[in-house]
Every structure is written in C-alpha cells, then in structure tokens.
Image (cartoon, helix red, strand yellow):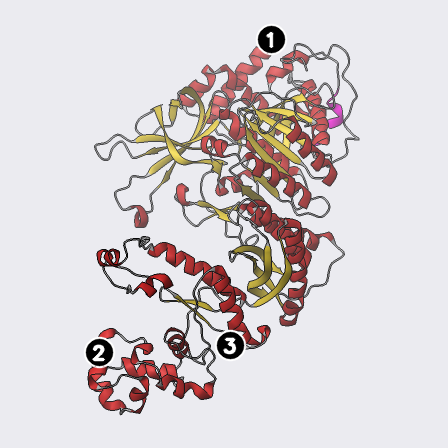
C-alpha cells in the first residue's frame, strides 16, 4: 500500500508520494489515510469538466487530475485571458481545490507550464523562452526516455531545442521531437472534447440564482427567442435542443428535447421543455438555485419559410407534428408507433411496430398487395400451443382446446402453406399450414400446424397465432 | 323458426341447396348437424338481396326494424364530441371488440379537415392476452397504412395523459382507449374528464373495455360486442361459397343509449366497401312477427342502408306499433 496523494500538512511533515504506508505511519502515527477510489475521482473530474462548460464548450479531461480547455474565441467574454484564468482558479479554490492553471498558445506548453510552475499567461512571442526553461519531463515523455536523455546531458527542453534533430531521432525515436514540435506550435495537437459542439448557443447569467420551474421555463422561452434570430439567419430550424442548468455549487443538469420537424418558434420550444420538465421534476434538484442557463441547438435542419394556408389540411399536419413532439418530450420518442408491413411472407416477420421518431413515414409507392390469405387483426407475440383434433393428413381441425377451453369448429378455410425462409431459419425448419377457423360461437382464429405428417418422425404441432375481428 | 311447418320446409330446402353448393360431404354433414349455422344460408340470402327477401321470407319485417335501430345507433355515434364505450364480456371477444371499434373509427370521416387518423392507446395486459395489432391484418380489415397510430404506455396515468393530449391536439378523427376490465385507476372521474374533453374539442373517443363488467361511466352510449358467425364468401357470379368465412359479423347490444328501444343488432363489416350493414338472423325474426306490419318498404332499393353520416330523414317509420316487440333477451 502506497501513498498516492498528500495534502499540504503531510507534505510539510516530509512524506512523499509513493512512500509505503507503514513507513508513513511510522513517521507520523496520527496520519489520516483514505483509500483511493479511482472511479469516484474520475466522476468528480467529469463533474468539474461539466462545470467548466460555462467558460468554453471544448473541455477535455487530461490524465487523472487535469482538464484541458480550448478558450480560443471565448476569452473576450470574460474580459481577457488573465481575468478568465483568475475567475476560474478563484472559483475552483472556493470549492476547496488546489488548482494551478496556465494559458498558452499550444496544449503541450499549457500542460507543461501548469504542472512545472511556469508563468500563468504565455503570449506567443515568449513560447521558446518559456519552453527552454522547463525540464524534459514537461514534454510528457515516458520516464525511461527522460532518463536516457538525462544520461546524454539533455536535462532541459532548451538543450533539446538546440541539439541536432537527426541523431536524437535515431537514438530516442520520434517521440521527443514530436512532443517538442507540438509544444512549439510547429505541429498541431488536437484536443478531443467530451461533448459535441453545439451549433448555436444562447446563455444568460443570473445575478441571483433561481430555482422555481416557472422561472426556468420563462427564461428558456426568452433564450429561445434569442435563438430564433440566429436560426432564421441560417435558414434552419432546430431538431435537437439542449438546456443546461448550472447550479451554484457546481453541478450541471442537461435536458434534451427533440422534435420531429425543424422548429424555430419560441413558444413551442418552451412548451416542449415544460413537458420534459414535468417528467423530470423529481430528478432535478435545484439546491440553492441555478445561476447560469444556456440553450443549445445540437442539431438543425433546413427550414424553408412557408406561407400559412387558409385551408385546414396543412394546419392538420402541423397539429399532428405538434402532438408527436409533445408525446416524445413527455413519454419518449419510442412511445408512438405505426404498424408497418415488411417485405416478408413469414407471418412472424411480416410486420413491425415502427416508432414515429421523425413524423409519419412518407407514402412510398404502394406495392401491389401480395397474393396471400386473409391475415388476422391481432397477432400474438408468440404462437400458443393448442390441442387439436383434426382429419389426417392435412384436414382442418374439427375441435380444439386452447387456454383450457374447448372450441368446436364450425367452418374452416385453408390450408395455406407457408414455407419458411430457408435463408434465415435454415433448411430444416418445417413448413406451416395455416387455417382460418370459426367456432360455433362465432370467434375467428388463425391456427397453424407446424410440420407434415408424412415427413419426419415427430408429430406436427398445432399453434394459435392470431385472432380475427 | 317457430312459425310452423312452412318455415321448417323452407329451412330444409335451403340446407339442401347449401349442401349442393359445397359439394363436400363432410362439410355438408357438419353444417346440417349444427342448427346454429342453418341460419347462415338464410341470412346470406337476405343479405345478398334485401328487398327481394320481402314477403316470402319470414324476416322481412325485422329487416326494416333492424335498419331503424342501426340508423339511430349510427346517428348517436356520429355526433361530434362523444365518448362511446365498447365493451367485450370476455377476453376471447377482444378481437371482435377491437375490430368493431376500428370499423366505427373508419366510418368517421375527417372532420374539420383532419385526415382520417386513429390513435389506439393499447393496454399492456390486453396486448399480451389478445395480441398486438398486425399490419397485414389491418390492411385486410380495410384500414390503410398510416391511418392507425399505436401507443403502448406502461402506466394508466400516461395513457390518460395521452388520450387527453390526443383529444386536445385535434389531430385524430378518433381515439381508441383500451382498458382491461374495470381498473381502479380508471373510474367515473377519469372517464368524465375524458368525455368533457371530447365534447370540448369535438373529437370522438372510443373506450374499449376488454373483458370488463358493466360499470357506470360518462359515456353516452355503451355497446356490448360479441362475435357472431360470419357471412359466407360471395363469389364473382353472386353465389355464395358454402363453408367459407367472409366478412366479419358482430352482435351489438346497446346497454346504455340516449334513444330508447335500440335492441340487439347484427352488423356485418363489408371490407371492400368499408361499411357496416345490419343483417338479421332468423332468431330475432320470431319475436317480432306480426303480419301486416310494414316497415321495410322505405328501405326498398338501397342495398346499403347504413351510411353513417347520411341524415336520417328517410326510413324512420316512427315507433313500432305496440305489441310488435316480444320477448327480448334483455329488458333495456
């Protein structure tokens, strides 16, 4: 058991990271030891990354104890890079964390400066000078390579910069020079952000935190009005909206709402969020209130402006679209389905309840109706076994027992032989003979016999698959 | 069939004809042995040619009578803003009840310009017991693709909200709300709320109670649906295919209705025409035979008397004369 992290008091006593636990306890008997929980640490770092969303949408998690933020284009919103960094570090310190940060033109240099006591703000002109003063470890190289470089005498990055490149490439591989180039800015280094970048984003900072649902919805409506201008300028409507609520203690809530058709009307966006919030009411704990609200458009589509009609038909389609959005927001996008017929003759696979995510499926060219027998109105999920008395070898049933009640057959239509789809079920699956049966009371059933009497040693089985109207 | 030896003779002759048409010994034997299905031939004859069934068949008077009941029923259903309860007594009848509900919803035309679109809010238990909607079956029943939207919410509260939202949105010409039995969570208050919403928005709500008991609800019309033996298939030359199962037939009993005196009806759903047509079996004929009563004359010449939205101006002969109805199965 080794120590992985220390606070200032422990460092002051003289303990080091990597020291054995027993040794540490010997040095300081009253040591307070907490077991390391990597998952909890990771979750905490993710939560911090969520919180840093208020500064820039491009946030990446860096190792186990750092965050990389791409603030190009965002610094002016906070009054400059220095003010941004001060604000960030200050707030995190108020949370109780010990934070070091630095702003640099390249990610590599920023990483190095933050962890090795570099300056806080590094203008582009100072990059070589600052880099030269940092040790080689600051280039994120493996420890063996650092040892080898140290043996040769390259202890600082400045030495590496002035040394000839060819021999270093041959002796130590491409890694050191690649890292150096990236830190200098000669080569690009991408940061992979945790979440995709929103197309359009409107946010409002509040002087006093709010916690009531009506206030949140009102604000969301006003933000949506702000979005409308941006969407109209692009000629687009939003398909997927996201509402971010930043709580004062750092927790961030995300609420997503999707629509079936491109939308830029503020009132409808607000109503969709109100449906969603009515479902999420219990999960959303406002705590001491939300201080920042942001509305993102994550996905958008072309929305051509349409003239409102005087006739009712176009309005009817709009009503259905609105109903669809309302239900998707409240009960999920898979709630409403439409029964669709599939191109298969095997009854189990001939139909599907397809979710209406994007509105009604467009009317395709109607295929000619297949030549087949009449199909039942309701089909069971699994065929149920039935005990049947029937004429051999392929006559219709005369009497059957299903779900513990006897039925006497008055009329029967069939058999309709359906051969299995050998490309899916294999060649050994027996064919089915379907019968449409009416019993003496008038109930109409759809029975089938699986298998034939002449072939094979096993007796065919009878099953009930559906009921007619 | 208690009208005497003449009727018996006619029946026997019909049975012979049926056996001839079928030509299969086993089928004919089965049909002859089962007295219930002797009606089929008679019924199908009447159905094929209702006005020709006039004086010679014993059912002429009842044909007209059934038509009037049917008209009354359809006018009640066609009123905008209604809630109609359709009940099936057993889970075995669930297929028939759903079929009848879909037939009714298909008859309702798009009003206020809405395209004809039906929402079925299914119940999870009924879907497990009686099956899920099958798209080829819907097509074979007469409903087009995209006309029926299906929803399967898990909780009753979600189902109620869905029905409410569907009625408010006015995007559907009919909403079918399926419940199993008489659940606690769906009582008088909930049904009253839904019926008020239907009236306010002018939509139609069909409450489909599968295998449920009669319960007081705010529906203005409550119908009990049972399946009845189907009509035989009609061949291209007009004759009937004996032993074939043709259009579905439902037996409807109006348990609660605004117009009094609507008795039990047998309705056939003609798939290719998308219409409901009343037919009468001989069973009901016996109770209402009074020679000389004429109520079928008005219906002469119309093969399909049951147009849902046609005004009931013609065909209403007023209340039947006293004594024309005898021995109904149910004192409603």
Q: Position of residue B268 (x, y in %)?
A: 60, 29
Describe residue A434's horizontal placement relative to residue A361 as left or right: left
Q: Quadrant of the C terminus of chain B?
A: top right
Do marks 1 and 3 share a subunit? Answer: no
Residue at label 2?
A: A147
Q: Chain of mark 3?
A: A
What residue is at 50 percent from the left and 50 percent from the top? A368
How packed is label 3: few (under 14 Cα within 10 Å), some, or many (20 or more)? Answer: few
- Residue A189, how many percent across, how many down? 39, 77
Check disc 1 and report its element: helix, strand or loop: loop
Residue B298 falls within the magenta-colored stretch: yes
Residue B149 vs B297, above or below: the answer is below
In-front residue for pair A410/B329: B329
Q: Earlier in the sequence, mark 2 or mark 3?
A: 3
Does the CB distance between marks 2 and 1 fall below 8 Å? no
The chain identifier of the residue carrying mark 2 reads A
Q: Residue at x 24, y 87 (%)?
A: A168
- Observer able to see residue A126: yes
Q: Quadrant of residue B329?
A: top right
Tell which of A177 and B68 is nearer to you: A177
Judge whether B110 appears above or below B315 on screen. Answer: below
Label ID, residue A281:
none
- Mark 2: give few (<14), some (14-19) or many (20+) Cα within 10 Å: some
Q: In terms of secondary structure, what is the magenta stretch mainly?
A: loop
Residue A416 falls inside the magenta stretch = no
Q: Quadrant of the N terminus of chain B?
A: top right
Q: Give the foreground label among 2 and 1.
A: 2
Looking at the rendering, the stretch of residues picked out in magenta corresponds to B295-302
Report the Cα–Cα distance between label 2 and label 3: 35 Å
Q: Is residue A56 visible?
A: no
Residue tagged 1: B2
- Residue A72 is marked as 3
């Amino acid at each position: 058991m080794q120590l992985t992290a220390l606070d200032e008091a422990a460092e002051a006593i003289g303990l080091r990271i990597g020291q054995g636990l027993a040794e540490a306890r010997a040095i300081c008997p009253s040591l307070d030891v907490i077991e390391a929980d990597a998952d909890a640490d990771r979750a905490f770092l993710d939560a911090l990354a969520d919180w840093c969303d208020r500064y820039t949408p491009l946030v990446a998690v860096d190792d186990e104890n750092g965050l990389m933020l791409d603030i190009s284009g965002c610094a002016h919103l906070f009054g400059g890079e220095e003010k941004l960094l001060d604000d960030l570090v200050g707030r995190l310190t108020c949370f109780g964390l010990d934070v070091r940060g630095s702003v640099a033109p390249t990610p590599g240099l920023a990483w190095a400066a933050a962890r090795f006591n570099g300056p806080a703000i590094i203008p582009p002109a100072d990059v070589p000078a600052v880099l030269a003063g940092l040790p080689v470890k600051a280039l994120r190289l493996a420890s063996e390579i650092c040892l080898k470089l140290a043996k040769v005498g390259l202890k600082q990055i400045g030495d590496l910069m002035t040394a000839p490149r060819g021999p270093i490439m041959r002796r130590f591989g491409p890694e050191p020079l690649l890292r150096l180039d990236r830190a200098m800015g000669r080569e690009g280094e991408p940061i992979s952000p945790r979440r995709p970048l929103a197309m359009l984003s409107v946010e409002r900072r509040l002087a006093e935190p709010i916690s009531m649902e009506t206030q949140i919805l009102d604000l969301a409506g006003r933000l949506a009005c702000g979005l409308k201008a941006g969407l109209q300028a692009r000629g687009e409507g939003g398909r997927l909206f996201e509402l971010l609520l930043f709580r004062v203690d750092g927790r961030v809530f995300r609420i997503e709402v999707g629509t079936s058709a491109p939308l830029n009307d503020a009132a409808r966006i607000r109503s969709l969020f109100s449906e969603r919030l009515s479902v999420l009411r219990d999960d959303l704990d406002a705590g001491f209130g939300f201080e920042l609200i942001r509305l993102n458009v994550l996905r958008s589509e072309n929305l051509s402006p349409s003239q409102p009609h005087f006739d009712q038909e176009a309005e009817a389609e709009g009503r259905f679209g609105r109903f669809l959005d309302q239900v998707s927001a409240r009960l999920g996008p898979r709630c409403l389905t439409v029964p669709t017929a599939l191109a298969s003759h095997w009854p189990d696979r001939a139909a599907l309840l397809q979710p209406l995510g994007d509105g009604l499926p467009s009317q395709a060219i109607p295929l000619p109706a297949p030549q087949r027998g009449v199909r039942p109105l309701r089909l069971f999920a699994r065929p149920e076994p039935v005990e049947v008395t029937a004429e051999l070898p392929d006559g219709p049933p005369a009497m059957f027992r299903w779900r513990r009640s006897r039925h006497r057959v008055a009329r029967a239509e069939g058999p309709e032989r359906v051969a299995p789809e050998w490309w899916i079920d294999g060649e050994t699956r027996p064919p089915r003979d379907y019968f449409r049966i009416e019993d003496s009371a008038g109930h109409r059933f759809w029975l089938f016999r699986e298998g034939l009497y002449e072939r094979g040693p096993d007796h065919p089985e009878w099953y009930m698959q559906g009921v007619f109207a | 069939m208690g009208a005497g030896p003449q009727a018996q003779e006619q029946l026997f002759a019909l049975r012979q004809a049926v056996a001839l048409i079928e030509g299969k010994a086993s089928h004919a034997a089965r049909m002859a042995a089962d007295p219930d299905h002797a009606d089929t031939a008679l019924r199908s004859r009447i159905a094929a040619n209702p006005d020709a069934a006039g004086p010679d068949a014993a059912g002429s008077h009842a044909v007209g009578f059934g038509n009037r009941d049917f008209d009354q029923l359809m006018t009640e259903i066609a009123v905008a803003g209604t809630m109609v309860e359709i009940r099936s007594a057993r889970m075995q009848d669930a297929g028939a009840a759903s079929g009848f509900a879909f037939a009714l919803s298909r008859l309702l035309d798009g009003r206020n310009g809405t395209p004809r679109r039906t929402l079925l809010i299914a119940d999870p238990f009924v879907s497990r017991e009686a099956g899920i909607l099958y798209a080829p079956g819907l097509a074979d029943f007469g409903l087009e693709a995209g006309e029926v939207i299906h929803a399967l919410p898990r909780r009753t509260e979600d189902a109620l909200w869905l029905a409410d939202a569907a009625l408010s949105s006015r995007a559907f010409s009919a909403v079918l709300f399926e419940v199993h039995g008489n659940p606690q969570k769906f009582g008088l208050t909930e049904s009253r709320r839904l019926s008020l919403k239907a009236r306010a928005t002018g939509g139609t709500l069909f409450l489909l109670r599968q295998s449920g008991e009669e319960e007081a609800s705010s529906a203005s019309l409550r119908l009990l649906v049972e399946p009845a033996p189907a009509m035989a298939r009609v061949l291209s030359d007009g004759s009937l295919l004996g032993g074939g199962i043709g259009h579905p037939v439902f037996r409807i009993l109006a348990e609660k209705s605004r117009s009094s005196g609507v008795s039990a009806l047998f309705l056939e759903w003609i798939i290719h025409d998308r219409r409901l047509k009343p037919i009468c079996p001989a069973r009901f004929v016996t109770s209402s035979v009074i020679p000389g009563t004429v109520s079928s004359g008005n219906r002469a010449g119309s093969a399909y008397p049951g147009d849902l939205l046609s005004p009931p101006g013609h065909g209403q002969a007023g209340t039947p004369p006293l004594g024309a109805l005898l021995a109904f199965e149910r004192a409603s």
